[in-house]
Image (tube, rainbow, N blue to C red):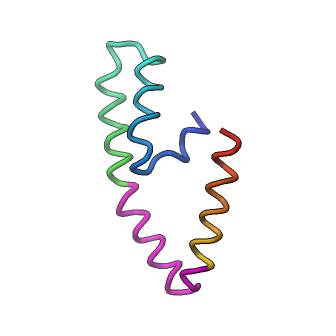
C-alpha cells in the first residue's frame, strides 16, 4: 500500500484500482473505490496549492528538477 501512495495523482487512476480490484473483497470494493476517488480528486488541487507555494519561494526550474528526481527515485523502487 505504501508504494502506491506515489501514484495518487491522475496517473494513479489505473494501477491503484487494478490493485484494489484484485485484493479487496467484492462486497467492500464500492466503499474502497469511493474513498479512493475522493483521495485522488482532493490530491489534484492540493498539489496545485503546494506547488504554488513552492514557486513563490523557489525558482520553477529547481522545483521541477527536485520533484522530478524524487519521483524517479520513488518509481524506480516500485
Q: How many marks?
A: 0
Q: Quadrant of the C terminus?
A: top right
Is residue 35 within the magenta segment? no
Which residue occupies the extreme top position in the image?
A: 26
The answer to which image quadrant residue 17 occupies is top left
The x, y position of residue 70, in whole percent, is 66, 59
**In the picture shown, does residue 43 fall above or below 76?**
below
On the rendered structure, is 73 left or right of 38? right
SS assignment for the magenta stretch, majority: helix
Picture layout, residue 71 above or below residue 16: below
Task: Tell me the quarter of the picture where residue 42 sits.
Answer: bottom left
Task: Locate residue 5, reporting x and y percent.
Answer: 54, 43
In the rendered view, would you say 73 is above or below 50? above
Q: Quadrant of residue 36?
A: top left
Q: Residue at x 70, y 52 (%)?
A: 73
Q: Residue at x 32, y 13 (%)?
A: 27
Left or right of residue 19: residue 36: left
- Describe residue 55's horizontal placement relative to residue 63 as left or right: left
Residue extent of the magenta highlight: 43-61
Screen quadrant of the N terminus: top right
Decide whether residue 46 is among the magenta residues: yes
Residue 35 position within the rendered picture, expressed as x and y whole percent measured from the top left: 34, 37
Residue 74 versus residue 49: which sits nearer the camera?
A: 74
- The residue drawn where x is 48% and y is 17% is 23
Q: Position of residue 4 (x, y in %)?
A: 55, 38
Give me the residue at 41% from left, 71% from top. Answer: 49
Amino acid at each position: 500500500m505504501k508504494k502506491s501512495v506515489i501514484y495518487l495523482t491522475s496517473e494513479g487512476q489505473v494501477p491503484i484500482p487494478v490493485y484494489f480490484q484484485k485484493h479487496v473483497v467484492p462486497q467492500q470494493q464500492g466503499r474502497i473505490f469511493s474513498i479512493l476517488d475522493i483521495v485522488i480528486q482532493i490530491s489534484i488541487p492540493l498539489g496545485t496549492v503546494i506547488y504554488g507555494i513552492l514557486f513563490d519561494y523557489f525558482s520553477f526550474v529547481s522545483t521541477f528538477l527536485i520533484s522530478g528526481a524524487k519521483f524517479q527515485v520513488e518509481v524506480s523502487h516500485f
